[in-house]
Image (tube, coloured by chain):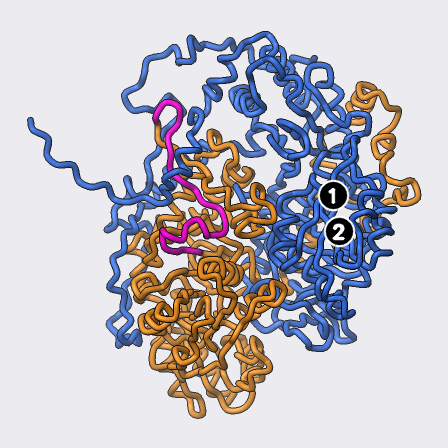
Amino acid sequence: MRYLPLTPDDRAEMLARIGVPSVDNLFADIPAAQREHELPRLPLHKSELEVERALSRLAAKNVPAGAVPFFVGAGAYRHHVPASVDHLIQRSEFLTSYTPYQPEIAQGTLQYLFEFQTQVAELTGMEVANASMYDGSTAAAEAVLMAHRVTRRRKALLAGNLHPHYRATIETVSRYAADEVVALAPVPTGGEDIIAAIDAGCSCVVVQSPDVFGNIVDLKPIAEAAHKAGALLIAVFTEAVSLGLIEPPGAQGADIVAGEGQSIGNALNFGGPYVGLFATRQKFVRQMPGRLAGETVDAEGRRGFVLTLSTREQHIRREKATSNICTNSGLCALAFTIHMSLLGQTGLIRLARANHAAACDLADRLAAVPGASVLNDTFFNEFTLCVPGKASDVVEKLAAKGILGGVPYSRLAPKSGLDDLILVAATETTTEDDRAAYAAALKEVL
Amino acid sequence: MNREGRGATTPHIVGGVSAGPVTFTGNRGLDLEEGLIFEIGRTEVTGVDIAEPAPFKDRLGSHVRTAPLELPGLSEPEAMRHYVRLSRMNYGIDSGLFPLGSCTMKHNPRLNEKMARLPGFADIHPLQPLSTVPGALELMAELSRYLLELTGMKAVALTPKAGAHGELCGMMAIKAAHEAQGNGDRHVVLVPESAHGTNPATAALIGYEVRSIPARADGTVDPAAVKAALGPEVAALMLTNPNTCGLFERDVVAIAEAVHEAGAYFYSDGANFNAILGKVRIADLGVDAMHINLHKTFSTPHGGGGPGAGPVVLSQALAPFAPVPALVATADGLVLVEDEGAAGAEQALGRMSAFHGQMGMFVRALSWMLSHGADGMRQASEDAVLSANYVRACLMDVMSAPFAERPAMHEALFDDTWLAGTGLSTLDVAKALIDEGYHPMTVYFPLVVHGAMLIEPTESESKASLDLFLGALRDLAMAAKAGDKERFLGAPHYAPRRRLDETRAARAPVLRWVRPEPLPNAAE
């Protein structure tokens, strides 16, 4: 077996050194009645060529986004990632290293995390950021738990236009932690009145902008109302590129920002692995979940970086930890930070404009199709299309014509009764021909 | 001890300072220093060519960004050099032996990376019509089939994104099951002292009170202690098996029976599954839920701290409570049930995260499984256990190994008794190992032994590689006992950084770069 270096002779020598006749002696603590003597009922080992063949056959059954005009978003976005990003994250020393618990030989990881934290803080307009979380939805759930710790209240108020998967993730953790969640009903056209629902029992108000329907939300008045009630504003985003062009939550009074960073540096991957971005104010830093890289000096006075404030974490605090999380999304954070370093703000703003232009063009084209209408006043690179009949049927018919036209909102929230809405995203990867093809196909389908 | 293949280097250090001149740049030959992107990049530079769109009427309303932004850019050559230089300050499995106990740093085959990057896996969206991704569902089903066959369990929840997330999922399933049976008042979870910190943290997160179970003298859990702690208020026992001392809990069946008899569930922490792959099916031990770290046992890379993946296998009793999305085989083929309460997920515990889990890791893990096959997986476990026992056997005479009367599983545990009187600590030994070209073992864990050193060689090391490592450790042990203190106290001497001040980092945390204040002009 090509990955196992020991030879039969090696094994015999090692057994002799240990002083046992057979490897089975080393498994003697497994109760005899339960020990397996047969191989698992699975195929035997395969050559590299055979594995490639088997997995390529499965991959070939799927329609990759790059093969068709593609407009699917709703929390994961197809962007172009420079070739150098994927090359660099596969460097052995990044790919095959561990959590940097031995900082003297993990300065590469620690320095990029420090750079990543700074980039995330700048992008969101916040003071500090952590070294990433699993993804946007779990980051949002952790933000709610953190708000409970900070305010000592146990009720979260969720905007109706929060991504339904994010809502479900928060609700699930809250249900088992016996915390209260109040979730408002969705308002696809935007402008929902969440301020009226804020009361003195709320630990936090969770608002997404751009929201799941694509509307950009003015967070300032919500932040003011939340603060007046002694609650925190948790601002959520699912499209990090948008922050190159729209006012970041930090400039609007957000206390915690939780978002998805997949769209910078990371592939779609059918939903994971992604990278959760988490930022807050300096004064809450000791209540923050997740890992943090911090600056220090070594014995010779040279600047270096370490994981810090780990007394918040599970391996030290056990049941009193701020979170049970003991990892981040290291390699996805690396992809994010490399792509962001390549972009710089000049490239990021240009990328954001290219996205916004593509979406505006598509919205105009689709709104001109008889029977279809665009609900949004404002949006970044995703908007909501209202169609006659069932959105899920329309999306299927478009797929049959080779257009992946978006996400029926009913797929995310089947009980909402909003069955005629399609969430449509257009990034810089869409061409004018793609957008024209979509409009033409929609005309045929409706 | 075999010394073949060792470099014939003699240390050229005098009093801890390199014998060569201090360089003007701070670089030393191939050891290159690297500034932060904020120091080398410029905000007007970009390494990505993006065409400026033709003028158009924007739809941003009054939400245009006015907040300052300070994100420097790097041209592509600058970026390549920056990250290559950073990478060279890291130690990885490809650099050398990475004997971190409990972490299973095994070889990461590049085939897995290649497979995960096939456009049919990497370039598909979780919400594109399911009719356009049958191969993705098939891959998930195949991975599930392998995990269920290897564990004998009844259902698997693929979505958890890491081991701790899997623990959360499994414990929520237990809580959901109790509530469904009207036993929601059970509020205590038993956790052995030697458990990973995530176990108590997870239990506490969902409102359980944690009750600790002591270990007996041989490092394992005594069924009598479990029975004494059980009662009508206990919801579950969380047990790591093989445990964090590297021992198989030989009374696990009796423990599981006692737990079930008391109306509680048995959660198993699968961090150390690598030791028993193909050797025992955990269902036969009475386990109700166990998470599996795909980044440990199935070699998906650790990546400097993630992303991982922590699917959870469930017993018949807990299967109905698996979270959504759930993959259900129907007459019409595979269906991904995405909504709580829908057919096939009527009692689902909820949703762990957006979308369907760590697909990129599923591909890598399945690639590893197909490559090894039933025979290779079993051989991998045997080799991992053999190597760990070999390590212990070769170091027993110079270091102190608690619980050595029982076979080790996949990792060898040492304490710091052997350092008594040397004035040196476990940390000093770890840092000295860096100078010898190795990543240190796990230190100060498990907490149940003093100054713990936990060595996990995995199945990926050749005997020659193990012998060199053991030689280095033996030499260090002798040097420690011979009073060669400076070698240890000043270590590491040869890393990109000398020992770092972690206390200072925590006292006044600097967690991001800020532009330094311009210095006032100094008088000439």
Tint of chain A: orange
Q: State the image coordinates of residue B380 (x, y, percent, origin top left).
A: 75, 37
Q: Which mark is residue B213?
A: 1
Q: Is residue B87 visible?
A: yes
Pick the residue in front: B214 or B478.
B214
Q: State the image coordinates of residue A342 (x, y, percent, origin top left).
A: 35, 49
- Which residue sits at x=42%, y=9%? B15
Q: Are marks 2 and 1 on the same chain?
A: yes
Q: Which mark is residue B237?
A: 2
Around disc 2, counting alpha carbons within 10 Å, would you say few (fewer than 14), some (14 to 19), or many (20 or more)? many
- Tell me which corner region of the image, top left, top right, bottom left or bottom right, holds residue B454: top right
Side of B524 where B67 appears, left or right: right
Side of A167 where B286 appears, left or right: right
A82 relative to B41, above or below:
below
Exactly how many numbered labels are in the figure?
A: 2
Numbered range of the magenta stretch: A278-301
Amino acid under disc 1: Ile
Q: Is residue A69 visible?
A: no
Quadrant of the image containing the N terminus of chain A: top right
Subunit ID for the residue under disc 2 = B
Q: Residues at badges 2 and 1 in contact (C-beta under 8 Å)?
A: yes
Residue A282 colored magenta? yes
* Chain identifier matching the blue colour in the rendered picture: B
Q: State the image coordinates of residue B287 (x, y, percent, origin top left).
A: 80, 52
Residue A288 colored magenta? yes
